[in-house]
Amino acid sequence: MELSVRAAAAACGERIAVVFEGQTLTYRELAERVARSWAALQARGVKAGSLVAISASNRPETLVALLALIEAGVPFVPVHPRWTEREVQVLLNDAQPAFYLRDAELGESGSAMGAHWPAPPSDDAPLAIIYTSGTTGTPKGAVLQRSAFIASAAGSAQNLGWQDADRWLLCLPLCHIGGLSIVTRCLIARRALILLARYDAQAVLASILRDQATLLSVVPTMLRGLLAADEAGLLQELRAVLSGGAATPLTLAEQAVAHGVNVLTTYGLTEACSQVTVQP
């Protein structure tokens, strides 16, 4: 199992990798954008061994930059794009990153020919430091190794399996472990990720229809809103809807089943790299 865009491009370059607002990128095209992003980051001084804080909004530019850091083995700290300056400063003071990349600074201004990749990182190397929600105190940084993401992807694949046509719709924030782990699962499996800029029930339903999504991860509040808005029964077209991030009330799960939705309740936590257990 490889956490590598370049390996995916070599193995299945013409397979769809990313879908955003109806536009698609193949793995070959994604690898080219990732190389340009890494060249631009190198030009700013980012190198193996750096720790990079990055404003992680759900945009293609952010996704490409995150994949460039993963490819180069540069650990990063996702910053919630809607945090206040004070909240951001608390994180920066604690993590002490060498660089802080804001949304406006993310892009692919470099040349793919200028991307000089470091030696492949060890699976034991840290991939990201994800700050917990802080429900029992000040948020704390959980250092997650590459092997943790690989193991999480393996567990998900063992339970859900992968089908050739699978496309995972991501409407969770990239700055949280739930969203980021969907990225790494799809990359390892060489399947398509459908990226939504933000959660909106109508936008999710429209994307299911337009982008041919088969898998969806939500929190219970999202599921409740989707069920209320889904007059056309589009959720029934999904192979599975995973509900986690908080306890899914039995009445909500029963409502989803009555609606014809294959809802799977999940439990996970940041420190365990997302899912710990998922309903079969």
Image: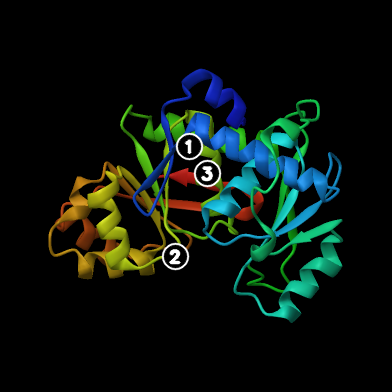
Q: Secondary structure at mark 3?
A: helix
Residue 31's place in the image compared with 270, above or below, is above
Badge 1 vs badge 2, beta-carbon distance below 8 Å: no
Q: Quadrant of residue 98?
A: bottom right
Q: Which residue is mark 1?
A: 186
Badge 1 vs badge 3, beta-carbon distance below 8 Å: yes
Residue 274's place in the image compared with 86, above or below, is above
Residue at 71% over, 68% down: 139
**Could you tell whether 65 is left or right of 184 in the image?**
right
**What quarter of the picture does the C terminus occupy?**
top left
What amino acid is labelled 2 in the image? Arg
* Category of crowding for the residue at label 3, using alpha-carbon neighbours closer than 10 angstroms: few (below 14), some (14–19), many (at least 20): many
| Residue 146 percent location from the top left of the image | 69, 36
Q: Which residue is mark 2?
A: 198
What amino acid is labelled 1 in the image? Cys
The foreground one among 198 and 153 is 198
**Could you tell whether 153 is left or right of 89 in the image?**
left
| Residue 225 percent location from the top left of the image | 29, 70
Instruction: Answer whether residue 280 is visible to the viewer in this image.
Output: no
Q: Secondary structure at mark 1?
A: helix
Residue at 21% over, 70% down: 228
The foreground one among 182 and 274 is 182
